[in-house]
Amino acid sequence: MEFTDWRKSARSEQNANCVEIGFAPCRIGIRDTKLGEGSPILDIDRAAFAAFVRLVQDGAFDS
């Protein structure tokens, strides 16, 4: 599967290690920015990613 339009958080520092997401029909790819295009890609469906984002926004993973 080919993911396009890779993005990382605007809150991420320019040279910081973080993750970025890419898009494909019905799928989201997640990869490590420090490895770039050589990074393994976690491939998940959009519904699962949306559920994860909702949990983060609701504070489910806050310490």
Image: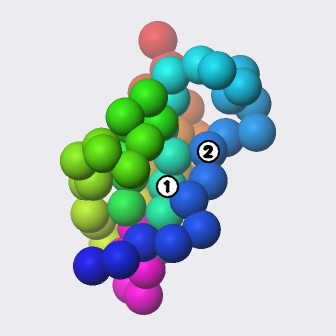
Name the residue rendered at 43%, 42% in the picture: 36
Could you tell which of marks 1 and 2 lies nearer the N-terminus?
2
The magenta region covers: 24-28
Judging by the rendered image, the residue that carries numbered circle 1 is 21
Residue at left 64%, top 21%? 15
Is 19 situated above or below 31?
above
Looking at the magenta stretch, what is its main secondary structure? strand
Is residue 2 shown above or below 53? below
- 27 part of magenta stretch: yes
Left or right: where does residue 51 sit relative to residue 13? left
Which of these two is toward me, 10 or 47?
Answer: 10
Which amino acid type is marked by label 1?
Ile
> Is residue 25 located in the magenta-colored stretch of the structure?
yes
Could you tell me which residue is drawn at 26 percent across and 63 percent down? Answer: 43
Viewer can see residue 55: no
Q: In screen coordinates, is 32 left or right of 17?
A: left
Instruction: Judge whether residue 26 can be spotted in this image.
Output: yes
